Amino acid sequence: MSRVRVHNFSVSLDGFGTGEGQSLEAPFGHAGSRLHEWFFPTRSFHEMQGEPGGSTGIDDAFASNWGPGIGAEIMGRNKFGPQRGPWADENWKGWWGDNPPFHTPVFVLTHHSRPSIEMTGGTTFHFIDASPAEALKVAREATGGLDVRIGGGPATIRQFLAADLIDDMHVAIVPIVLGRGERLWDGLEDLEQRFNVESAGSPSGVTHLTFTRP
Amino acid sequence: MSRVRVHNFSVSLDGFGTGEGQSLEAPFGHAGSRLHEWFFPTRSFHEMQGEPGGSTGIDDAFASNWGPGIGAEIMGRNKFGPQRGPWADENWKGWWGDNPPFHTPVFVLTHHSRPSIEMTGGTTFHFIDASPAEALKVAREATGGLDVRIGGGPATIRQFLAADLIDDMHVAIVPIVLGRGERLWDGLEDLEQRFNVESAGSPSGVTHLTFTRP
């Protein structure tokens, strides 16, 4: 059965999945790269960048689950880019360069339609105006039975959690206090009652939580 | 050198150190006992209750640091009781019965003065109207060189953190989403820059974080 999964989603101690003030230069706003410092040294991140090496400890044990078995990603528009409203510049093709790390169809949730973009390496961005359930239906049809990853940002994951559409979720709690930005947990009171939750610390200071639908 | 310490302070994933709606029947409001379920099975909690037995695993390894070396506690008034404003009922002597687990002087921060209360077992409650720095000075004089514990609630710990008066802090992140209540981390942006932070998971699902002043 095709599952709906979240991987490597980092939040601060105060629950922010991204900082305040996203811009072209700052995809995560004032958080900068602080939410993801644990991820950069891993072998999984190196592989995404087409680089050799990287760590293979606890952080990578979690990070490495991001790719296998995934047939499509759904992401919010703010993960795709800093623009808001109608697309003023259709030259924008995401933050990831010509060969994005997804290598699958990626469905970008937006109220503003736009032609699909086929990238190098198997990634195609599709732009759809859909509810979480509708988007999931469309994405599943594209996976050939594989799993669907919900890629973020916080609002997108929150909406899928609120609709009870997530089967597996890996959240990395990063020991920083961001103070402002976009919270992951808002509106999800008693979320834990729908999941088995396990926790593992890492020498990097990050805590890996897994949420598994029983 | 006498240190200022926080132990066993539990917060939800969304950062709440207590729920909404404290009352005589519900010291932690709608959170009930959910923030402390990890603590009850430990040997340390059993000892506080004067009972034998209890677990001695990871959770107890952290919980057991609560007592040793402490010469006084400072707590906020809302930890002491559910009353607000002037003391209408001076018969209230805290939630803990005749023999509270503190066994030291305890300084309760309140704008409303009240005579001290000497309990069985070495605990004496003193009521003081003081800033965090002033309260710490008073508490230190009572410890004979031992450490001072900041006992909570969230607002009290937050005020001591904001004033940069905490040396060591143990926070237990409990994998529940409370949704409402009183947050620990508010107003503490970049707190981590003042501490070394380490993390350990536990089979109970709780994550133990230690904040240590470098």
Image: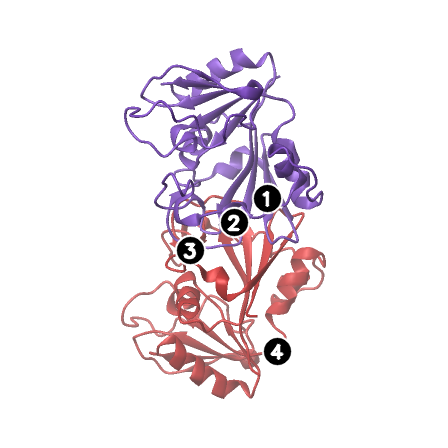
Chain colours: A purple, B red
Distance of label 3 from label 4 (alpha carbons): 32 Å
> What amino acid is at disc 3?
Glu
Is label 2 on the same chain as label 1? no
Whichever of callouts 4 and 2 sits on the residue coming sooner in the sequence is 2
Residue marked by disc 3? B25
Q: Quadrant of residue A17?
A: top left
Q: Nearer the viewer, mark 3 or mark 2?
A: 2
The C terminus of chain A, quarter of image:
top right
Regarding residue B158, the answer to whether it shows in the image is yes
Distance of label 2 from label 1 (alpha carbons): 35 Å
Give the class, few, some or many, for how many residues have Cα within 10 Å of label 1's Cα (few <14, many ≥20). Answer: some
| B15 with respect to A210 (left or right) | left
Q: Are marks 2 and 1 in contact (CB under 8 Å)?
A: no
Distance of label 1 from label 3 (alpha carbons): 48 Å
Residue marked by disc 4? B69
Q: Are marks 4 and 1 in contact (CB under 8 Å)?
A: no
Q: Chain of mark 1?
A: A
Whichever of callouts 3 and 2 sits on the residue coming sooner in the sequence is 3
Residue marked by disc 1? A40
Give the class, few, some or many, for how many residues have Cα within 10 Å of label 2's Cα (few <14, many ≥20). Answer: some
Q: Nearer the viewer, mark 4 or mark 1?
A: 1
User: Residue drawn 56% across and 44% down?
Assistant: A172
Place of residue B212 in the rendered image (x, y in percent of width and height, measured from the top left):
57, 67
> What amino acid is at disc 2?
Arg
On residue B34, which mark appears?
A: 2
Is label 3 on the same chain as label 2? yes
| B201 with respect to A138 (left or right) | right
